[in-house]
Image: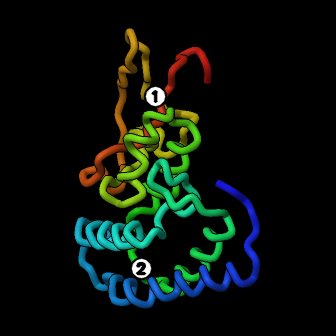
């Protein structure tokens, strides 16, 4: 991801591209009055919109092309966010998938993991969740009890997670677990 600046002409051209895409594809997607505002109907609408974004080269703007992103700059991302903000009723079911899980995968995943998982996350084909909250600890991650123990060449997870939004519809998740029981 580059933090390069754009010329005023480049910025305005990209803004016009974003605005044209949103004017064509975002109108009417929000599902106001949906009796299940965090449910499958909204998620599927978000996935369909995300696929259109990916097809237009506007998904995963700051992520490398090699991993399914657009390979653009933070300046492009800022412009996109400004234009997207004009549609406050848009569905946001991919916020955790794209706002938490994707950046973690990009930062800490191996090259092989990035190749395997990022393109399908960026395109909306696979939805991810975060698995932080636990019974008795809520979202206080300092009190979590779930353990991850290395057994040969794989990690074994033991514990319980609760309140994971849309978990039943997600393909993958990011989990927080203790790997050393002697560390608070």
Badge 1 is on which residue? 145
Residue 14: which numbered mark, if any? none
Please identify the quadrant where the N terminus is shown.
bottom right
Which label belongs to residue 90?
A: 2
Choose between 50 and 176: the one closer to the eye.
50
**Which residue sits at x=71%, y=84%?**
9
Q: Position of residue 179 (x, y in %)?
A: 51, 21
Mark 1 or mark 2, whichever is nearer to me: 2
Is tag 1's residue or tag 2's residue first in the polypeptide sequence?
A: 2
Say which quadrant the C terminus sits in. Answer: top right
| 138 and 181: which is toward the camera | 181
Residue 35: quadrant of the picture: bottom left
Q: In the figure, is residue 150 to the left or right of 64?
A: left
Q: Nearer the viewer, residue 160 or 79?
A: 79
Is residue 72 shown to the viewer in this render?
Answer: yes
Q: Position of residue 89 (x, y in %)?
A: 43, 83
């Amino acid at each position: 991801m580059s933090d390069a600046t754009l010329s005023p002409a480049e910025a305005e051209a990209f803004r016009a591209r974003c605005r044209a895409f949103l004017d064509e594809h975002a109108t009417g997607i929000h599902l106001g009055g949906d009796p299940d505002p965090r449910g499958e109907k909204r998620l599927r609408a978000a996935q369909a919109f995300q696929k259109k974004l990916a097809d237009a080269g506007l998904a995963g703007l700051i992520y490398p092309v090699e991993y399914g992103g657009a390979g653009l700059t933070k300046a492009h991302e800022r412009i996109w966010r400004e234009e997207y903000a004009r549609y406050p009723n848009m569905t946001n079911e991919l916020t955790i998938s794209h706002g938490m899980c994707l950046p973690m995968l990009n930062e800490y995943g191996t090259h092989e993991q990035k190749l395997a998982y990022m393109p399908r996350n960026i395109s909306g084909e696979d939805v991810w969740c975060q698995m932080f909250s636990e019974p008795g600890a809520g979202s206080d991650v300092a009190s979590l009890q779930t353990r991850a123990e290395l057994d040969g060449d794989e990690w074994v997870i033991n514990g319980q997670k609760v309140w994971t939004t849309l978990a039943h519809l997600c393909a993958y998740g990011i989990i927080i677990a203790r790997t050393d029981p002697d560390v608070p």
